[in-house]
Amino acid sequence: MSLKSLPLAVVLLLGISAGSPFVVQALAQDGDMTWQFSEANDPDNKGAMTARLVYGVPETDNVQVIGVCDARPSTSAKFSSVTFGADIGDLANGQDADLRFSGGGYEQTLQGTIQRSEGEGLNGVHLDIENGDMLWTAFAEKDTLDYSVPGYRAASLKLEPGRDKIESFVEACRSYERAILGSDETDAAEPESASPEKEAFDSAKELGTVAAFEAFLANFPTGFYADLAHAYIDKLNAADSAAASAPVPTVVASDPGPDPSCEDLSTLRSQSADTPAKITFVNRSGMYRSVLWLDFNGQPKDYGGMNDGEDLTLDTFLTHPWMIADGPGDCIEIVMPHAGARIVTLAGAAAIPAPPPPTKKASPPPPPVEKKKAAAPKCRSRSVLIDGKCVLKRDAATYCGPGYRLQGGKCVHGYVKPKAQIRLPTWQLEGRKHGCPPGLAWSAQEGCHEND
């Protein structure tokens, strides 16, 4: 059977593993998560050609993204059915909702509906997206994308490590679409990563002009990279139109003003994403520093950390505040981006300036008065003296001196990052909760039993 005779249904589900209503953000920070792509005739899917895309920890239930598209009968061959796992709070199943995507200068809001699963499954926002939508271009071009329902916590997708897997998945879905539409393009060979078509597209992208992309389209008028070229042309034309229609300011402010302080933290939040900017943090404080973005709800979102001597460069927007914190997460300072780019050097405590030289000969200082040593405190019978303090005998074994704290049964200096907690599947947690032996699940009907 040829591809032209195969109809199409595209279903793409991006979500979270069962057992929690919203854990996408935490999972996205797991360094073991990878993108995986496969394509084959699936006997469980009526023998249809099926492509699969997974983002998660291999061979575990720790999954953030599940994507499927297949060649089966469909009334909407040009659309993909997509569900993004997201924080949806108490929103009702089937309720209309917007999903906002942003990152690296890209921003788009799509309208969908709330989807809630019964029991284990995916909770998030369901969208119907055209296969040629700009969102797929962003998936192919951006390193990361954030998405959220306005008013709720955002989640992140790391796209760069699995860009080839994502492109393969999109190519497969579009080939199914061409098959159901009966296009002559179906039998054309798809471009490989090192093909002349991709090399020409990369050259046009490097020049970044409308003329360069139009020259590419003259030689390669159809296909995946042609769709990207059209999207770039639309973006460049829109930018030129906006620049031409923007009024010329009569006064240009040269001083952006002072940064807010940590005392203003409760009132700070990101405003708009209209003016891209770049900010670089250089850590010269002699201590570890973490960098957190204050999102549109004023909530800090961790964007990484720096040891002394390291630097971190981020793409941001002009009205987005950034918080610098120490290891425990306490605010040290607030930094705002400047137009274009800004470099911020994080310094330690300011040195005490030396006193000015005397204008006349000063009289010799009086001889120092010898201070009497304070008598050591007397402790009661139930206390012992440690570091000049009376500590109850029952607490002496766990007492740590100044600058130290008790962690893991030992006194450690400063902040020590706790060990990562292992996330167990829901069935194992239920088995442990009801006293089942390790490796067994539990249910009200069967009690302790093997997980199936």
Image (cartoon, rainbow, N blue to C red):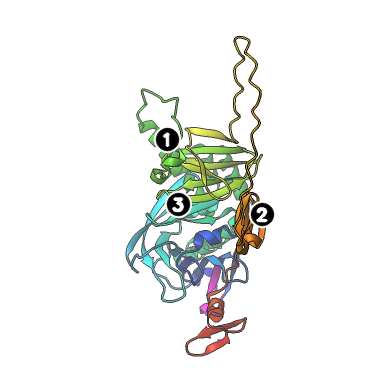
Q: Position of residue 159 (x, y in %)?
A: 56, 55
Please, what is the three-letter code of the amino acid marked with disc 3? Met
Residue at the spot 41% in from the left edge and 50% down from the top edge:
108
Please name the residue that numbered disc 2 is placed on: 412
Residue 452 is at least partly visible in this image:
no
Please name the residue that numbered disc 3 is placed on: 134
- The quadrant the C terminus occupies is bottom right
- Helix, strand or loop for disc 2: strand
Residue 388 is at least partly visible in this image:
yes
Q: Position of residue 282 (x, y in %)?
A: 60, 37
Magenta residue span: 42-53
Q: Nearer the viewer, mark 2 or mark 1?
A: 2
- 272 to 385, vertically: above or below: above
**Quadrant of the image occupied by residue 110:** bottom left
Lower position in the chain sequence, tag 2 or tag 1: 1
**Does the magenta-highlighted stretch encompass residue 51?**
yes
Please, what is the three-letter code of the amino acid marked with disc 2? Val
CB atoms at circles 2 and 1 under 8 Å apart? no
